[in-house]
Image: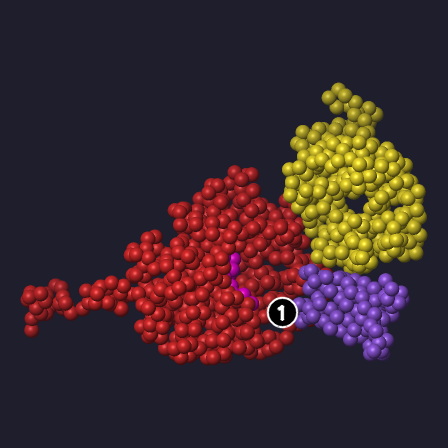
C-alpha cells in the first residue's frame, strides 16, 4: 500500500472550511469529498476552485476532503492551497517535519 | 292549553309581547356548560384529554388549533396528537399559531394519517418535510393577523381548540402569568378560544375558582383537563435575553438605530416593535440610548415583549407595552404586575377584519428576513436553499401597518447572498417595505422619497438596493438556480386572505 | 506631513480568521491591520499568509485603509510574507520589532524589488514601523527618518514594557516616556504618531480616558483590538465645539489675509503661523470625520 502524504488546513468555524489533501502516487486524479451548506448554489464553483488551486500547485492525483462552513471562494482556495502545500512539504521532507 | 310553571298560569301568547316560552323547560345553567354535573361542582373538569375530545365530538377531517405561547417547551401539541392518534382519528387539519422544533412529532402523525395538513405556521423539521413533499395538500401559511382574520371571517373554522393553560379554574378562566408553566401573554390564544366550536383548556395548575386575573374567560372554554405537565419551564421563557456581542450584528443594529433616529418619526409619542432576534434586541438597546440622550418619551412597544421592553417602560421611555407574546421571565413578571403592560390578542394586534388593529398605529417595525430582493420583497418562509423553514409571524402585518418598516439582515450568511434579484418566496410585498439595513449599507425603497430626504447627509451609508445585491454577489458569486419541482407544497396567504405566493416542492 | 490619511483607529484583524477578514471594512475603522504576526501561532503562519493574500486579491475594502502586519524579516516567516503580500499592493505594511534604521532600509529595499517585479508603482506600499524594544525606543528618530515609505510611527506597549521590565498599569504611566518620544520623533520626521492598543475590551470608559490623554499628547490615532472600541476612540478624537470654532476662525482669518494679500496673519491680536493653521485644518478634518456615529466618506454616501 502506498503511504499517503497528508496536509490539513482551515477550521470548522463559520465562514471557514476544513480541508484535508492526501497526495497519491497512483494516477487516479483528484477525488473530492465535499460537504457544504452552499453546495446547492455553488457546487460547480467550489469544485473548480479546488481543481484550479491544485493544478496551479502541480497536484494531479489526490484525495481531497472538505468540510465547508460557508466559506467564500477566496477562503476555500486559500485552505486548499495551504493543505496542498503542507502535503507537498511533507512529501519533500520525507515526512520528517 | 295554558302553561303552568311553578303553579302559575301563563297565556301562550301575550298581545304586545308575543309567544310565551314558559320557565322550566330549559336548563337553569348556561348552555355552554355541556358537562353539567348533578353535584354542581367541577362541571367542566374532565379526567382525560380523550374524554374532552370525545365530548367535543371530534371526528375525522376536523380542524384542531393550538397556540404557541409555550414555545419549544410545549408538551400539549404532542400530547393531544398522541391521544387523537390513539382514538384512531384521521385526516386532521392542524391550525397552530406557530410550531417549534419540539413539535417534530407531528411528522409521525402525518405519516400515520392522523394529520392531513397544516394551516397557519410551520417550523424547521415540519417545514423541511413539507418541502420534501410529505403532505398531500399544501400547507397554508398565514401571518398572526391573517390567521385570526381567517377565524373571524370563517375561512378557518376551528372545530376544537386545545389550549395550553398555565393556570385555569374549574370554570375555565385561563391565565398565562401564573403556574409552573407560566408564559406571560396568551394573546395568540384569544381567537382560538373565541371562535373554535369546542375549547379544551389543558393545564398543570388547576386553581380554586375564580382564577383572577384571567386572560381567557370561562364564557369561551368548554372543558378543563388537568395533566401532570403542560410545559418545560426553561424552554417556555428564556432568562434575560442578552444583547448580541457579534460585532457584525452590532454594526447593523447601530445603523437601524441611526435610521430610526433620523427617520422623522423619532419624537415624543414614538412607537415601535422590534422583537427578540439578535439584531432587533441590539437595535432596541441603541434606540433606548438615543431616546435617553434626546429626552424622548415614546408611546408604546408592541408585539413580542422582552425584559428590555419592560426596562424601557419602567424608565419612562415608553408609556405602555402591548404584549401579544412575552419572550422572557421579566416580560411575564411585568405583565402580571404592571397595569401599563397590557396583554393583547392577535385580532387587536393585527387583524384586517377587526375595526382597528395596533399595527396601524405603529411608527417603526424592525423585521428580519431570510432573503430580500431588489424590489424590496421579503422572504421569511424559505431559506436560501428553497426549503420551507419558518412561519410568517407578524412580519407582513407590521410591515403593512407601520409607518417605517425596517428589514435587517447581514448581507451574507455563510456564502449565501441575502439580497438577491428575486426572493424564492414573497412573504411581505416590497411596497410595504421601507428600508433594508445591512452591515454594508442601507437601501431605502425609492417609493419613500421623504425618508430618503430625511436620511441623506446624516452619515448613514445609503446605497441603492441593486448595489447591495451586486456587492453580495461580488463576494459570493452568482448562485445556481434552486431545483424546484412543479408541485405546490405551500400557499402563502397575505394578511387579507389573498394569495401572495406559492412554495414549490424542493427536488 | 506626507499624507493626510485619517488613522484615528487601526483595527487588528487576525489574519487566519476568514469571517473577520471578509467583514474588515464594515466596522468603521479608519485603517485595518491584517495580522500575520502575533495573532498567528507559528504552525499557522503559512495558512494566514495565504488567506490574507487571497482576501486582498479578491475582496474589496471600500473606504478603509488596508494594512498588513507582516512578520519581521529577522524571522523565518518575514520574507515569504513580503513576497506574497507586496504584489497585492496593500496600503501599508506594519513592521514589528523595528530597532534600527537598517531594519527599515532592508524592508524598503525588499518592497522596492517586489513592487518592481509585480509591476505596481514604486513606493506605493507604505511602512508603519512598530517599536517594541528599548533599543527601538532609543532609535525612534533614526527609524522615523529611515525610509520615504514611512507614514506613521507606532509602538507596541506590551512588548516594549516587557523589554523595559516595567509594570503595566491601567493608567499607563509606564508609557509616558515612549509616548512623548514617539510623538516628538513623528513630528520631526513629518509623519503620524499612533498609540498602542488598550487591551481591556470591556472597559470603554478606561479606553475613552486614555484616548483623550494620548490625543492631548499629540497622537493621531490608536490601534484597537475589537470592533466595539472603534466608536469610543472616534468619539474621543472628535474635537470639542470650542476647538472647532477656533479652527474655523483661524482658517477664516487666513482666507481674509490672503484676500488682503497680507503676509502676516493674526487672530485676536496674536500672530498665527503655519503649525497653527495646519492644526486647525486637522481639527476640522477630525470634526468632519466625527460627525455621526460612523465615519463618513468611508462608505458610499450618496
The front one of B372 and B334 is: B334
The residue under the point 57% across, 64% down is B379
Q: Which residues are magenta?
A: B389-403
Using the image, determine if residue C197 lies above or below residue B53: above
- Residue at 86% x, 48% y is C72
The vertical placement of B114 against A81, above or below, is below
Find the residue positioned furthest to the top: C269
In the image, residue C156 sits, relative to residue B482, either above or below, namely above
Return the residue at label 1.
B385
Residue at (93% x, 42% y) in the render: C102
Q: Position of residue C192 (x, y in %)?
A: 81, 38
Q: In the figure, the red chain has which letter?
A: B
Chain C tint as drawn: yellow
Which of the chains bears the disc numbered 1? Answer: B
> Percent position (x, y) of residue C69?
81, 49
> Is B130 contained in the magenta span?
no
Amino acid at each position: 500500500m502506498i503511504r499517503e502524504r497528508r496536509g490539513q488546513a482551515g477550521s470548522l468555524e463559520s465562514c471557514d472550511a476544513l480541508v484535508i489533501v492526501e497526495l497519491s502516487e497512483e494516477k487516479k486524479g483528484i477525488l473530492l469529498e465535499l460537504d457544504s451548506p452552499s453546495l446547492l448554489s455553488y457546487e460547480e464553483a467550489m469544485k473548480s476552485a479546488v481543481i484550479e488551486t491544485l493544478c496551479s500547485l502541480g497536484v494531479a492525483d489526490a484525495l481531497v476532503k472538505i468540510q465547508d462552513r460557508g466559506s467564500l471562494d477566496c477562503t476555500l482556495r486559500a485552505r486548499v492551497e495551504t493543505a496542498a502545500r503542507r502535503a507537498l512539504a511533507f512529501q519533500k521532507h520525507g515526512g520528517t517535519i | 292549553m295554558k302553561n303552568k310553571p311553578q303553579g302559575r298560569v301563563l297565556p301562550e301568547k301575550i298581545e304586545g309581547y308575543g309567544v310565551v316560552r314558559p320557565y322550566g323547560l330549559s336548563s337553569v345553567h348556561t348552555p355552554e356548560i355541556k358537562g353539567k354535573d348533578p353535584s354542581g361542582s367541577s362541571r367542566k373538569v374532565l379526567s382525560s384529554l380523550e374524554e374532552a375530545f370525545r365530548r367535543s365530538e371530534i371526528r375525522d377531517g376536523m380542524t384542531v388549533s393550538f397556540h404557541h405561547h409555550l414555545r419549544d417547551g410545549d408538551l400539549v401539541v404532542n400530547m393531544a396528537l398522541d391521544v387523537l392518534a390513539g382514538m384512531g382519528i384521521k385526516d386532521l387539519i392542524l391550525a397552530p399559531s406557530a410550531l417549534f422544533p419540539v413539535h417534530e412529532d407531528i411528522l409521525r402523525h402525518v405519516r400515520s394519517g392522523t394529520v392531513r395538513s397544516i394551516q397557519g405556521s410551520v417550523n424547521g423539521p415540519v417545514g423541511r418535510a413539507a418541502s420534501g413533499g410529505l403532505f398531500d395538500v399544501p400547507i397554508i401559511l398565514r401571518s398572526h393577523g391573517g390567521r385570526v382574520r381567517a377565524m373571524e371571517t370563517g375561512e378557518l373554522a376551528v372545530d376544537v381548540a386545545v389550549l395550553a393553560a398555565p393556570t385555569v379554574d374549574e370554570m375555565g378562566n385561563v391565565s398565562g402569568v401564573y403556574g409552573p408553566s407560566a408564559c406571560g401573554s396568551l394573546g395568540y390564544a384569544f381567537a382560538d378560544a373565541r371562535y373554535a366550536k369546542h375549547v379544551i383548556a389543558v393545564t398543570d395548575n388547576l386553581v380554586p375558582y375564580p382564577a383572577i386575573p384571567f386572560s381567557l374567560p370561562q364564557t369561551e372554554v368548554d372543558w378543563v383537563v388537568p395533566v401532570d405537565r403542560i410545559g418545560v419551564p426553561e424552554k417556555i421563557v428564556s432568562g434575560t435575553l442578552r444583547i448580541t456581542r457579534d460585532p457584525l450584528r452590532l454594526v447593523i443594529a447601530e445603523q437601524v438605530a441611526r435610521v430610526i433616529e433620523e427617520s422623522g418619526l423619532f419624537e415624543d409619542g414614538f412607537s415601535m416593535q422590534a422583537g427578540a432576534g439578535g439584531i432587533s434586541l441590539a437595535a432596541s438597546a441603541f434606540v433606548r440610548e438615543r431616546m435617553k440622550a434626546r429626552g424622548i418619551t415614546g408611546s408604546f412597544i408592541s408585539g413580542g415583549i422582552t425584559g428590555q421592553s419592560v426596562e424601557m417602560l419602567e424608565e419612562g421611555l415608553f408609556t405602555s407595552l402591548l404584549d401579544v407574546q412575552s419572550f422572557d421571565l421579566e416580560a411575564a413578571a411585568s405583565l402580571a404586575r404592571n397595569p401599563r403592560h397590557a396583554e393583547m390578542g392577535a385580532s387587536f394586534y393585527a387583524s384586517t377584519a377587526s375595526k382597528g388593529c395596533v399595527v396601524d398605529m405603529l411608527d417603526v417595525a424592525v423585521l428580519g428576513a431570510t432573503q430580500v430582493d431588489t424590489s424590496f420583497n421579503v422572504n421569511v418562509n424559505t431559506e436560501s436553499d428553497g426549503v420551507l423553514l419558518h412561519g410568517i409571524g407578524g412580519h407582513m402585518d407590521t410591515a403593512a401597518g407601520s409607518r417605517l418598516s425596517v428589514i435587517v439582515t447581514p448581507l451574507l450568511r455563510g456564502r449565501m447572498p441575502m439580497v438577491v434579484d428575486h426572493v424564492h418566496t414573497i412573504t411581505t410585498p416590497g411596497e410595504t417595505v421601507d428600508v433594508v439595513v445591512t452591515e454594508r449599507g442601507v437601501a431605502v425603497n425609492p417609493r419613500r422619497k421623504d425618508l430618503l430626504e430625511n436620511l441623506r447627509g446624516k452619515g448613514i451609508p445609503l446605497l441603492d438596493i441593486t448595489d447591495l445585491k451586486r456587492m453580495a454577489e461580488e463576494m459570493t458569486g452568482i448562485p445556481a438556480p434552486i431545483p424546484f419541482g412543479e408541485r405546490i407544497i405551500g400557499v402563502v396567504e397575505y394578511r387579507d386572505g389573498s394569495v401572495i405566493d406559492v412554495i414549490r416542492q424542493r427536488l | 506631513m506626507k499624507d493626510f490619511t485619517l488613522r484615528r483607529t487601526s483595527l487588528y484583524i487576525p489574519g487566519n480568521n476568514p469571517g473577520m477578514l471578509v467583514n474588515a471594512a464594515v466596522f468603521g475603522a479608519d485603517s485595518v491591520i491584517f495580522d500575520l504576526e502575533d495573532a498567528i501561532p507559528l504552525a499557522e503562519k503559512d495558512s494566514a499568509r495565504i488567506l490574507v493574500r487571497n482576501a486582498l486579491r479578491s475582496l474589496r475594502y471600500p473606504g478603509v485603509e488596508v494594512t498588513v502586519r507582516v512578520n519581521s524579516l529577522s524571522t523565518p516567516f518575514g520574507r515569504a510574507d513580503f513576497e506574497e503580500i507586496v504584489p497585492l499592493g496593500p496600503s501599508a505594511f506594519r513592521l514589528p520589532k523595528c530597532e534600527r534604521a537598517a531594519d527599515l532600509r532592508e524592508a524598503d529595499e525588499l518592497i522596492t524589488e517586489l513592487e518592481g517585479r509585480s509591476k505596481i508603482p514604486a513606493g506605493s506600499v507604505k511602512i508603519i514601523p512598530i517599536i517594541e524594544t528599548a533599543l527601538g525606543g532609543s532609535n525612534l528618530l533614526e527609524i522615523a527618518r529611515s525610509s520615504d515609505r514611512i507614514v506613521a510611527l507606532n509602538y507596541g506597549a506590551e512588548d516594549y514594557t516587557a523589554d523595559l521590565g516595567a509594570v503595566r498599569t491601567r493608567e499607563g504611566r509606564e508609557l509616558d516616556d515612549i509616548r512623548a518620544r514617539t510623538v516628538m520623533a513623528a513630528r520631526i520626521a513629518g509623519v503620524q504618531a499612533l498609540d498602542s492598543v488598550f487591551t481591556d475590551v470591556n472597559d470603554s470608559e478606561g479606553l475613552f480616558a486614555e484616548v483623550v490623554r494620548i490625543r492631548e499628547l499629540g497622537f493621531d490615532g490608536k490601534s484597537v483590538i475589537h470592533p466595539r472600541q472603534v466608536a469610543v476612540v472616534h468619539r474621543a478624537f472628535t474635537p470639542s465645539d470650542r476647538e472647532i470654532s477656533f479652527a474655523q476662525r483661524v482658517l477664516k482669518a487666513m482666507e481674509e489675509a490672503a484676500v488682503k494679500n497680507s503676509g502676516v496673519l493674526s487672530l485676536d491680536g496674536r500672530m498665527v503661523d503655519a503649525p497653527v493653521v495646519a492644526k486647525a485644518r486637522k481639527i476640522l478634518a477630525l470634526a468632519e470625520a466625527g460627525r455621526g456615529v460612523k465615519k463618513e466618506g468611508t462608505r458610499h454616501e450618496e
